[in-house]
């Protein structure tokens, strides 16, 4: 089923999918949900288009297993609607909370609208509560199982048992269900994107920022540390019995991740560290948590510093294991965004993406999909890094071979504090003049001919080896010194142009001139927007930081919970944005000018008065006004 819909149909979705009051206020945990609540949540779930897909996946799985079973009394739609209603009101998405909704928090009309009016309570509270709990649990996990590619018993497992569970998993099944889990999450998020008025939806022009954020696992029973080379757990043994000390773990698909300690914890560690000369010091910097890793992609403003005409929403997401398959998660998200019909004008990522992935896993696919990158570089990526045809490659661009060395090495010198920031920025701007120029637009394969910066009417430098073009502008240009010229001219100095392949320097390629003011503002804005979103998710109403609010076990169940959190976070941001737009703005006071001007204290005013006074004397020559005035 395609997630792309006509623009006119998307416009209609706002009026039926969005109700500001349902986002900005909650009903509490004991009040009744009405038929209107059920209908609004139902319209949202239906608009996401996930129900037909889940039914298709379940039928496919039953065919593969050659089995079946009695259908659940609670269908997928009822489970999704109740989940969304609970998240919207700010409740925890516990099975007990869902049970309470079905048990006693629905009005009679709401029970009819939800399709559960036929399930009659007996009147015995505990019996009915237990019955609803088991119905909810079975129906919820029946749905989650359709994208659960990481089956494992929900019990504590030792090292050998964990290894056995991992070995029994079917890699093809895991891959297939991973794709399903991503599709479900992105379809739900796309519903929130469509739930905006047309003018707000169109205000976003395609800029995306991506990052990962840790999601603490509900259970913190940790495995043994892994060997850095073999990536296998290194167990410890009882010195007396020689038996392995058992390490019991429940969240076997989560992994250890270093979390920055609080200042109080660091002070405590430093104070309690061994003081003996040969004692092993404790590191006060980090503690290790068992976490999952959420891959988030948000919409950001196209022009940094200008208030966007849209809320910055999460447009794609997935859940994985820390330090595993990051490139795959990123590519899958970008493919999903493009398949949903969205244009991507840029993707901003940090050094962990740009310097931590192989070109064939990240940079080349992004280039093939025509997704421009805005990136920062690791220390090993800065400065001169190869070249082609005599041109020198430096931080995402190719330059004239006679570019002054201090311009090429500006970034490493800045990192080593050999130059100050203003000198660095001046050198980066001067370096633009020596950058190669495109002769033509890239062809269908992405290949593009590039010219010497001293060639043609648009030359930005003057070179002894290039004759000045007769139509070249008279604007002063940088002059290449003979001592900076190479020993003999290479192709870029002899030919009109040199053809650069789409993959030449692809691991360093990016949209903006690295180090420039434009790059710095864009990169900082996009990264800060991402950090702001992370903080909102973790400390806002969704409370993502609190693992106690996510009690379901396993990565597939955690993906479901996090998906519902991201959906309601988007809806809250839309509501806040619309309310801010409707809020009347105070009228600005008329400018009265500077006080010293109004009181005649300005030197310019006094000088002007003297000049005007002199000009009223026709018999005198014009005043001798100083040149600086």
Image (spheres, rainbow, N blue to C red):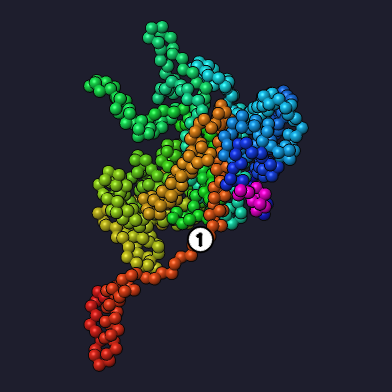
Q: Does residue 43 show up?
A: no
Outermost top residue: 241
Count the labels in the image: 1
| Front residue of 328 and 164 | 164
Image point (34%, 69%), residue name:
594
Q: Which residues are magenta?
A: 11-21
Mark 1, residues whose alpha carbon is within 10 Å: few (<14), some, or many (≥20)? few
Where residue 609 sits: x, y (%)? 29, 81
> What element does badge 1 sit on?
loop
The answer to whether residue 615 is magenta is: no
- Left or right, 336 with respect to 38, comes to left
Q: Which residue is mark 1?
A: 585
Residue at horizontal 64%, vertical 38%? 31
Q: Is residue 123 visible?
A: yes
Residue ranking furthest to the right:
118
Residue 236 placed where, x, y %? 40, 15
Left or right of 473 on screen, residue 114:
right
Q: Is residue 337 left or right of residue 407?
A: right
Residue 446: x and y in percent read: 50, 49
20 drawn magenta: yes
Secondary structure predominantly adopted by residues drawn in magenta: helix
Q: Quadrant of the N terminus?
A: top right
- Please provide percent x and percent y for residue 69: 73, 24
> Dividing the image into 4 quarters, which one contains the C terminus?
bottom left
Tell me the quarter of the picture where residue 51 sits.
Answer: top right
Q: Residue at x 54, y 21 (%)?
A: 166
| Residue at (41, 28) in percent of width and height | 288
Q: Nearer the viewer, residue 575 or 435?
A: 575
């Amino acid at each position: 089923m395609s997630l792309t819909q006509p623009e006119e149909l998307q416009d209609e979705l706002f009026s039926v999918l969005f109700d500001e009051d349902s986002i900005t206020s909650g009903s509490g945990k004991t009040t009744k949900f009405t038929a209107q609540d059920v209908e609004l949540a139902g319209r949202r779930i239906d608009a996401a288009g996930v129900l037909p897909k889940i039914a298709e996946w379940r039928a496919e799985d039953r065919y593969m297993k050659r089995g079946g079973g009695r259908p659940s009394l609670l269908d997928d739609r009822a489970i999704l609607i109740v989940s969304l209603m609970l998240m919207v009101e700010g409740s925890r998405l516990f099975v007990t909370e869902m049970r309470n909704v079905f048990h006693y928090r629905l009005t009679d009309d709401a029970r009819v609208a939800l399709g559960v009016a036929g399930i009659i309570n007996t009147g015995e509270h505990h019996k009915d509560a237990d019955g609803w709990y088991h119905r909810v649990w079975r129906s919820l996990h029946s749905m989650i199982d359709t994208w659960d590619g990481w089956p494992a018993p929900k019990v504590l497992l030792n090292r050998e048992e964990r290894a056995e569970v991992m070995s029994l998993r079917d890699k093809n099944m895991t891959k297939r269900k991973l794709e399903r889990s991503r599709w479900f999450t992105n379809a739900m998020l796309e519903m929130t994107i469509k739930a905006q008025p047309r003018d707000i939806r169109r205000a976003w022009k395609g800029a995306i920022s991506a990052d990962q954020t840790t999601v603490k696992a509900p259970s913190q029973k940790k495995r043994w540390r892994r060997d850095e080379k073999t990536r296998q757990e290194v167990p410890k043994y009882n010195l007396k019995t020689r038996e392995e000390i058992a390490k019991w773990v429940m969240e076997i698909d989560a992994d250890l991740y270093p979390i920055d300690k609080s200042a109080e914890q660091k002070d405590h560690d430093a104070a309690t560290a061994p003081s003996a000369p040969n004692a092993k010091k404790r590191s006060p910097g980090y503690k290790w948590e068992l976490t999952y890793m959420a891959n988030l992609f948000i919409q950001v403003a196209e022009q940094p510093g200008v208030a966007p005409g849209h809320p910055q929403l999460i447009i794609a997401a997935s859940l994985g294991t820390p330090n595993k398959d990051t490139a795959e998660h990123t590519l899958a998200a970008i493919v999903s965004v493009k398949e949903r019909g969205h244009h991507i004008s840029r993707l901003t990522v940090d050094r962990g993406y740009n310097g931590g992935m192989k070109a064939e896993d990240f940079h080349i696919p992004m280039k093939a999909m025509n997704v421009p990158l805005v990136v920062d570089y690791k220390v090993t990526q800065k400065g001169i890094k190869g070249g082609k045809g005599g041109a020198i490659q430096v931080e995402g661009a190719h330059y004239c071979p006679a570019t002054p060395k201090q311009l090429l090495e500006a970034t490493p010198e800045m990192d080593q504090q050999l130059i100050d920031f203003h000198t660095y920025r001046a050198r980066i701007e001067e370096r633009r003049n020596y950058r190669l120029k495109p002769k033509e637009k890239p062809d269908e394969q992405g290949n593009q001919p590039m010219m010497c910066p001293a060639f043609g009417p648009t030359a930005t430098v003057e070179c002894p080896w290039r004759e000045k073009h007769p139509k070249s502008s008279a604007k002063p240009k940088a002059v290449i010194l003979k001592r900076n010229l190479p020993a003999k001219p290479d192709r870029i100095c002899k030919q009109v142009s040199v053809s650069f392949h789409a993959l030449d320097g692809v691991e360093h390629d990016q949209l903006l001139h690295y180090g420039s003011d434009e790059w710095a503002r864009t990169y900082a804005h996009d990264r800060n927007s991402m950090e702001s979103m992370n903080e909102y998710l973790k400390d806002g109403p969704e409370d993502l930081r609190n693992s106690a609010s996510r009690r379901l076990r396993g990565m597939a169940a955690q993906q479901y919970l996090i998906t519902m959190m991201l959906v309601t976070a988007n809806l809250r941001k839309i509501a806040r944005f619309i309310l801010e737009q409707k809020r009347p703005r105070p009228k600005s006071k008329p400018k009265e000018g500077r006080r010293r001007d109004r009181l005649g204290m300005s030197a310019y005013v006094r000088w002007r008065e003297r000049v005007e006074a002199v000009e009223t004397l026709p018999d005198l020559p014009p005043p001798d006004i100083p040149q600086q005035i």
